Amino acid sequence: MHDRPNATEILEAVARLLADELVPATTGRLQFVTRVAANAVRLVAREIAQGDGPARAEWQGLDTLLGSLELPADTAELGPALVERNHELARALREGAFDEPAAFARVTHHLRHAVAAKLAVSDPAMIEDTSD
Amino acid sequence: MDPAEFPAHLEPFLCAQSGAARARVGGFRSLTGGATRRAFACDLDLTWSDGRVLRHEAVLIVFRPAGQQALAARSEFALLEAVKAAGVPVPCPLFVGEEALGRPFYLVERIAGEAIGRRIVRDERFVAARAALPAQLGAALAAIHATPIAGPALAVLPGAGESGDPVERALADIEALYRQIAVEAHPGFELALRWLGKHRPAGSARTLVHGDFRIGNVMVGEEGLRAVLDWELAHMGDPLEDLGWLCGRSWRFGRIDLACGGVGTREALVEAYEQATGRAVDRAALHFWEVFGNLRWGVFTLVQLRAFIEGISRDVELAMIGRRTAETEWELLRLIGARGGG
């Protein structure tokens, strides 16, 4: 176990340095990339804070579409295994396996949750949007 | 050749092209750099032997020697001449060359104004411009789409001389690019491709399509639209592709309620376009092209992710574009009716 501060506390301090001190002190392209860097650090902080909860939820969602599969025991294997299962889902979609209304509803229900989980890290404000 | 040497090499080129006795290139400075091209501002002072003088405030576009170009410099220059003649507001094309700088380049008139989308959509000083823009953008698109197809300038564009359905071509192209470029599977894009295949618009036309017509690629003054820029993705296709792209979710700069680039409603754009063309827009077809546009931008984010992963560029902004792919999946789910609300 590491001592405090934890990873997200350190990243938040770096993000504050970038956003509150370096952005006002720079101009032009350097200011733009500094703002992007601050957002990037905050994104990583949100991702760390979430742990593997979203990945486990995505796995369960894929279970309802592709049939149940045991969750990898080793957390490090979860990411690569999810990539493989999403390839399988993509193939099934391409072959028309989810064209029927009931199947379409199930797959969109899953994708809604999976994409919202990605946005919760990359752009939380967008989940709430009501576009035209 | 180092860019600092460009002015000295441009001067004899300008004399040869214009017949001027003397040419001076001043005020040379870098504007933007990109993966395939760089832009510089410069002022051209030409003096003829009879005493005539001419000054051009210009932009120099230099193509990277090894960069993969959507359009060659000469093709893009000829296209600018063609759309200028058709009444599209564009910077006046001045000179085009290859050997003088050791790589392809062209010069256009420099137009003052603001091109940064966030400022156009948000700044107080563009209130009047925002009120005028939907009608001006609709009219500019109508002029682009009315550009005469016959003639050599448009003959070299992708999709020119084809007799097939532009919808089929667009779908095939974006699917091929997605399958070639994607590092990981994106089930949301598969769903969108499936939806597009089943909702193809019945009728379609074939016109010049700008290909990247959006806020961020137009020069705007406080009174409104001044020029349409960034023609490198121009091609022959269905004109509604441009309208759907302009309404994409990713360039509303915080005004997500205003589909027309964050400056107006979708309906205001469509009405202006209908008035300028004299033809009704099929709303279902426009919806198809809006889905297509969001998918196309999603695939473009994958292209940029690929460049980052392969180490072509390690820039943090390129890295972050990879995390914007989910935005396009989210919007696609909403547009194809798979997401409640909105």
Image (cartoon, rainbow, N blue to C red):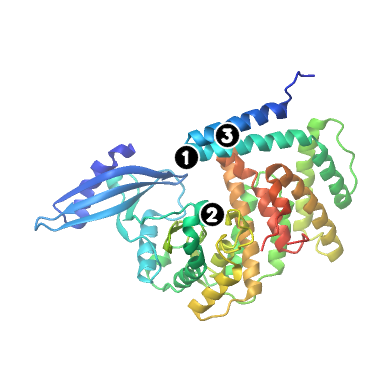
* Whole-percent x, y for residue B28 in the image: 30, 43
Q: Label 1 vs label 2: CA separation?
A: 19 Å
Residue B122: mark: 2
Residue B313 can be seen in this image: no
* Whole-percent x, y for residue B181 in the image: 61, 48
The amino acid type, in three-letter code, at marker 1 is Arg
Report in which chain the residue with disc 1 lies: A
The amino acid type, in three-letter code, at marker 2 is Arg
Residue A20: mark: 3
- Residue A5: image quadrant is top right
Residue A39 can be seen in this image: yes
Tag 1 residue: A29
User: B147 above or below B31?
Assistant: below
Q: Label 1 vs label 3: CA separation?
A: 17 Å
- The 10 Å Cα crowd at callout 3, few under 14, some 14 to 19, many 20 or more, is few
The amino acid type, in three-letter code, at marker 3 is Asp
Identify the residue at horizontal 69%, vertical 58% (top origin). Answer: B332
The kind of secondary structure element at disc 2 is helix
The kind of secondary structure element at disc 3 is helix
